[in-house]
Amino acid sequence: MRCGSMACCHRRLPEAEGTVVITRPLAPADTRPQVMKVDLEEVLAQPGRLLSPGRWNKPQVREVTVGDHPVILKDWRTMARWLRPLARHLARREARIYGLLQHLESVPRVLQVGDRTLVLEQVPGRRISRLRGHRAAATAAQALEEIVARIHAAGVYHFDMRKRDNILVTDEGKVYLIDFTTSVAPRHYGPLGWLLRPVAALVDRYAVLKWKNALAPEVLSTSERRLLRGLDRLRPWRKNN
Ligand SMILES: Nc1ncnc2c1ncn2[C@@H]1O[C@H](COP(=O)(O)OP(=O)(O)OP(=O)(O)O)[C@@H](O)[C@H]1O
Ligand SMILES: [Mg+2]
């Protein structure tokens, strides 16, 4: 399952089947553990710890231990039987988006892809909202902004960062983005993608400004403050997360 170049790895990851997926860092700057052998059957056989029960349109999410390592299993097989094609589509879609971002340290690695299942590196982080009032808040808010710029440069727009559960921060202050269920990669939509891109960029920008304002309002520039107020006015029904 090894491949020669990094670009090749990006393309092949989402289709990977078998037992070993990642045997080396995907990017030179990546300092995370390099070896992770994951047997999909072993992961699926474990009850693990339930993180999200899933719904008719959502996967069940469990934390499972492989060897000494906790990993995350997203399992769309728990969706209704008659929705199997949709479940397969959603699973492949999220795997494909993760695949586009595997060179980024701030996105969990894909460890296995199965039929309606996805095994991810577990990020030992807590939701970003816990940083409110903490002195690391300003750094995290700025790190989030940089990460979002990088995922956009990779052609992906997250679309769901207003939800505090989707941004995790480790004790060392590293920020991770998770949950690419509703994310879009405009390049997959042909000419429609050109229309989608600015809207998607604005939705993500709004989320970043919201977090900067919530965590460290002093880092907002005057123009950012103005943009945030303008976007807030467009959403009079908004509620705070
Ligand atoms: N790689 C990861 N590392 C650590 N925790 C994770 C990871 N992926 C998911 N989780 C945890 O599992 C929860 C559910 O996962 P995720 O958000 O990807 O699924 P979801 O179906 O979109 O659920 P929801 O709609 O509740 O957000 C997350 O809020 C987070 O607590
Ligand atoms: Mg989520």
Image (cartoon, rainbow, N blue to C red):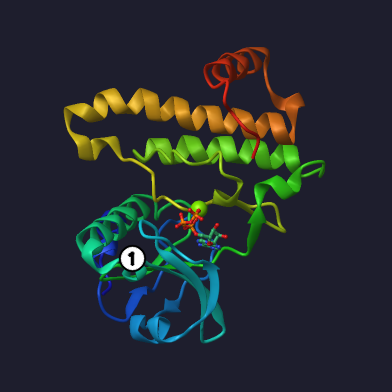
Count of number-bearing discs: 1
**Residue pointed to by mark 1:** 79
Is 27 placed left or right of 63 in the picture? left
Vertical comparison of 90 with 69: above or below: above
Q: State the image quarter where residue 31 is shown.
A: bottom right
Q: Secondary structure at mark 1?
A: loop
Residue drawn at 31 percent across, 81 percent down: 19
Query: Measuring 40% from the left and 80% from the top, which residue is drawn there?
Result: 38
Q: Is residue 201 above or below residue 221?
A: below
Give percent across and percent down for residue 195. 27, 23
Q: Is mark 1 within 8 Å of ligand 1?
A: no
Three-letter code for the amino acid on which mark 1 is drawn: Met
x 74%, y 32%: residue: 216
Left or right: residue 192 versus residue 166 is left
**239 and 219: which is toward the camera:** 239
- Residue drawn at point x = 42 percent, y = 56 percent: 27
Q: Is residue 48 above or below residue 87?
A: below
Q: Position of residue 90 (x, y in %)?
A: 29, 55
Q: Position of residue 121 (x, y in %)?
A: 48, 67
State the image quarter where residue 133 is shown. Answer: top right
Of the 4 image quadrants, the one containing the N terminus is bottom left
Q: Which is nearer the eye, 127 or 138?
A: 127
Is 117 on the left or on the right of 144, as rendered? left
Depth check, front residue: 151 or 217: 217
Quadrant of the image for the C terminus? top right
